[in-house]
Amino acid sequence: MKPETRIGYGWDSHEFKRGIPLKIGGLTLPHSKGLGGHSDGDVLLHAITDALLGAVAAPDIGSLFSPSDPRWKGADSALFLAEALKRVNAAGYGVVNVDSALILAAPKIGPHAVAIRTHVAELLGIPSDCVGVKAKTPEGMGTDDAAIAHVVVLLETKTAKRTTGKVRK
């Protein structure tokens, strides 16, 4: 018998580079540098993807979307998230909530947090009040040239009864 709930953890990091747009949570944010990576470098969507995959014991993002595969060069990270969601659904689970912490010196995430939460919630098919987005500065730890994302997700079987008594579909 499979458990009613599962928790997944994911993290990602990318170095800032000039000449590319900054993508976080599927949105393009104003900044002088973007995050380098084989795909669009979206640390938040990458971390969410890995958390979802880990929760259902699926291969990680690097195994499914190898950085050495030219198909994924510049790819929209929402594609990776969609594949992770398909695997979550195939395993019989749905996303309950996501909590994230972004660690970066700039830009400030506060002015964009609501838009990021809303967009991530849309991508996941959950209410925006089920997506947490926090930002922290590295406080002189020598990581001013990178962004890091840590994410936890909670999954629930599609037939599990919620505290409201409703069945999730």
Image (cartoon, rainbow, N blue to C red):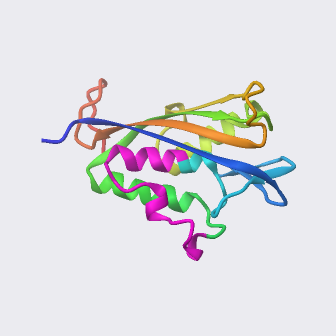
* Main SS category, magenta section: helix
Q: Where the C terminus falls, by quadrant?
A: top left
Q: Nearer the viewer, residue 8 or 112?
A: 8
Q: Quadrant of residue 2?
A: top left
Residue extent of the magenta highlight: 47-72
Looking at the picture, how far across and down is residue 101, in whole percent?
A: 60, 32
* Number of marks in the rendered image: 0
Q: Is residue 25 visible?
A: no
Q: Tell me which residue sits at (26%, 37%) in the image.
A: 167
**Residue 125 position (above or below residue 68):** above
* Left or right for 140, reference 83: right
Q: Tell me which residue sits at (73%, 34%) in the image.
A: 109
Residue 54 forms part of the magenta stretch: yes
Residue 164 forms part of the magenta stretch: no
Q: Where the N terminus falls, by quadrant?
A: top left
Looking at the picture, how far across and down is residue 73, in whole percent?
A: 63, 70
Judged from this view, the residue extending furthest toward the right is 32
Looking at the picture, how far across and down is residue 23, in whole percent?
A: 70, 52
* Left or right for 31, reference 28: right
